[in-house]
Amino acid sequence: MTKLLDKIKKAELRGKGGASYPVYLKWEKVAKARSRKKFVICNASEGEPDVMKDEYIIEHHPEKLIEGMKLCMKEVSSDKAFLFINQDYYKKYSKRLKGLIRDDNIELFKKPHPAGYIAGEESSLINTIAGERAEPELKPPFPSTKGLYGAPTIVNNVETFYDVSLLNSNQFNNTRLYSITGDCVWSGVYEFADDETIEDILKNTNNYPSFEFFVQIGGGACGEVLNSDQLNRPVTGSGSITIYSKSKHKPVSVLKNWIDFFMNESCGKCTPCREGTYRLHEILKDKQPDWYMFFAILADLPETSFCALGKSVSIPVISYFQNVLKDDTKFSSIYNINKQ
Ligand code: SF4
């Protein structure tokens, strides 16, 4: 094991794109793979709503990001890398990034679709770079075994490469970046310890609300929902905290926003997600929603969807009912009667 890989292992560094997979396991697998071609991809698509930490790094520390990618290429013996970047960030930062990249071994790849979460899923992103439809693939095989053009491929998030470059120069302090948005005064990106509690993060940034609220944490619309008395725990996933005022956001509109996000992001490849999210959207449009059908579809989606997008639909909705709407007589009885 090389010195850098050993440092990554000892620091227990995990990917910051949402899945929290140990970095050294992925890198070691590709480093050991016997293949003439290997690829490194940095995912800078940042398609989840309310997550903006990658943009913060691209804007303020692009040299660390590029350094992290170069370190990875060296570590796994790859001579070609792609920085997969969304159109908005490309417009704002491509000139500076190209200046830092200088050589041709790292290609700035502009995401062809304007926005969108699913094109940032790793197998879908690989398909996009290869010129194919932005659709997820069945896993295994994982990209570390069979990725871009069938070769072993590292796909990591911007913050992961940033962390590696900090580790390499002994500047990594077990911190991570948190995106805070929603009903707060000081929305933005903040750095705190990896295990900082949600409550402390909100208090230390002067964002702890004085009104009744709940939060959604981890990964934009896909994240878990917690009540204000459940904040003594760290943030998971992509590190986002979205604050919702209870009086400002009515339950059905909150549910509609999440369901519409999933419906619009569904790539249409599999029937449960394509049809299921559309049906959930239609049910919520009714003055008298069919809650039995709503919860039946929700229960099926994690079991039958092809990729993480469809599997995640129930996470915000069920945790919202269980953790927040439990105190609302109408919605708690809807949940207790219809839960599957
Ligand atoms: S779960 Fe949704 S996003 Fe994923 S493959 Fe199926 S249709 Fe596409």
Image (cartoon, rainbow, N blue to C red):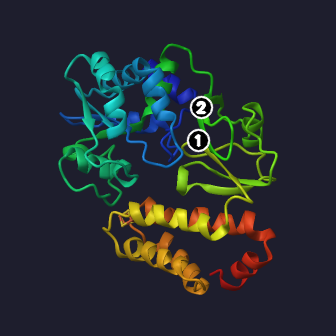
The image quarter containing residue 209 is: top right
How crowded is the residue under tag 1: few (<14 C-alpha within 10 Å), some, or many (20+)? many
Q: Where is residue 159 in the image (x, y as percent from the top left)?
A: 48, 32
> Can you say whether 26 is above or below 310 in the image?
above
Query: Is residue 218 toward the left or the right of residue 329 in the image?
Result: left
The residue shown at (49%, 29%) is 56
Residue at position x 37%, y 72% in the image: 274
Question: At 39% across and 34% down in the image, what residue appears?
Answer: 27
Residues under labels 1 and 2: Cα distance?
8 Å
Tell me the quadrant of ligand 1: bottom left
Q: Where is residue 165 in the image (x, y as percent from the top left)?
A: 46, 20
**What is the number of the mark on residue 239?**
1
- In front: 270, or 59? 59
Residue type marked 2:
Arg
> What is the quadrant of residue 66 in the picture?
top left
Whether 253 is drawn above or below 143: the answer is: below
Q: Is residue 262 visible?
A: yes
Say which residue label 2 marks: 176
Horizontal placement of 331 versus 132: left or right? Answer: right
Q: What element carries label 2?
A: strand
Image location of residue 138, percent across then percent down? 33, 61
Question: In the visual, does 45 lie left or right of 104?
Answer: right
- Local SS, label 1: loop
Q: Quarter of the image holding residue 178? A: top right
Q: Residue at x 33, y 19 (%)?
A: 96
State if disc 2 and disc 1 touch (CB < 8 Å).
yes
